[in-house]
Image (cartoon, rainbow, N blue to C red):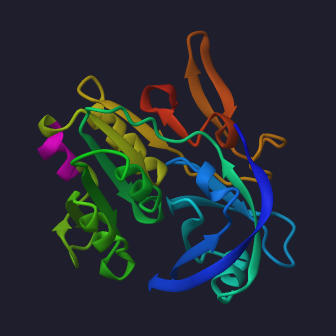
Amino acid sequence: MTYDSKPFRLLENKEIADGIFSWTVENRELAPLAKCGQFVNVKVPSRVLRRPISICDADESTLRLVFQVKGEGTRLMSEMKSGDEVELLAPLGHGFEIEEGKRYCFVGGGIGVPPLLFAAKQCKNPMVITGFRNKDLVILQDDFKSIGAETYLATDDGSAGIHGFVTDVLKEHLGEIDAVCACGPTPMLKAVAEVCKGKVECQVSLEERMGCGIGACLVCSCKTKENDGVHMTQVCRRGPVYKAEEVFFGG
């Protein structure tokens, strides 16, 4: 894995939903190295720990990062202005493995949706199923449609799209796809893995709190299944993307 810490220039900071912001940052050295499913660690002014943010999109000179304000660090990030310099440790982790010739369904929940945009751009005729608590938190629908994805939207309260869960939609279309890539809250990932088990291959991107982002600490450790039992592995190094059958969801 190749990564480095360098300054990026903030080209755009835009609020795209209630408390959810989209950054476009520029660095011609590190941006081209990004792969779908990877993340960056953002150095926040006046804060010791960096904030891990998934890569929503990338090209030869820029990265797009979409994050939700959840605490003081992300609040400070939301207040940064175009032209500001921000230091990123990037790109980090192991992402989605996309095989040519397969039809993929990308399933996302809440702030787990952003990394699926870059992933969906890597294959032909993608299906995208996204779920949110309500209409005020819906993001990236036009972005997915612009790349030709077959899109389905679900909300917990029925205020936008289908009234229900992403797994309700996934069950209806399981026979139309070859593989699933999912990112979102752990209960959602567990449910998606159960739907796919024994039917289609499934990759899941885990959301865990992180300290260093490079394997020097143990903050992001999670339980994974090996041949000899259950072990703790670091999401920042082994993941964040795993085969669903590798993850011990408990129960």
| Image-based side of 136 in relation to 49, left or right | left
Total marks placed: 0
Residue 171 is one of the magenta-drawn residues = yes
Q: Which residues are magenta?
A: 168-174
Residue at (70, 45) in percent of width and height? 220
Residue at (61, 10) in percent of width and height: 228
Q: Closest to the observer: 58 or 69?
A: 58
Residue at x 64% of width, y 33% of height? 238
Where does the image place residue 114, in percent across and percent down from the top left? 45, 62
Q: Is residue 187 left or right of residue 2?
A: left
Query: Magenta-highlighted stretch: main secondary structure?
Result: helix
Quarter placement of the N terminus: top right
| 12 relative to 181, above or below | below
Quarter-of-image position of residue 105: top left
From the viewer's side, name the closer residue of 79 and 72: 79
Q: Is residue 142 left or right of residue 95?
A: left
Q: Is residue 150 above or below residue 178?
A: below
Residue 223 x, y percent position in the rendering: 61, 32
Q: Where's residue 242, x and y in %?
A: 51, 34
Whether residue 250 can be seen here? no
Instruction: Pinpoint residue 100: horizontal percent, then vertical percent.
Output: 32, 33
User: Residue lying farthest top?
Assistant: 228
Snapshot quadrant of residue 40? bottom right
Position of 194 relative to 147 (above/below): above
Near-viewer residue (109 or 16): 16
Write the residue at 83% across / 78% down: 45
Q: Is residue 194 visible?
A: yes
Whether residue 172 appears in magenta in the rendering, the answer is yes
- Residue 14 placement, left or right of 52: left
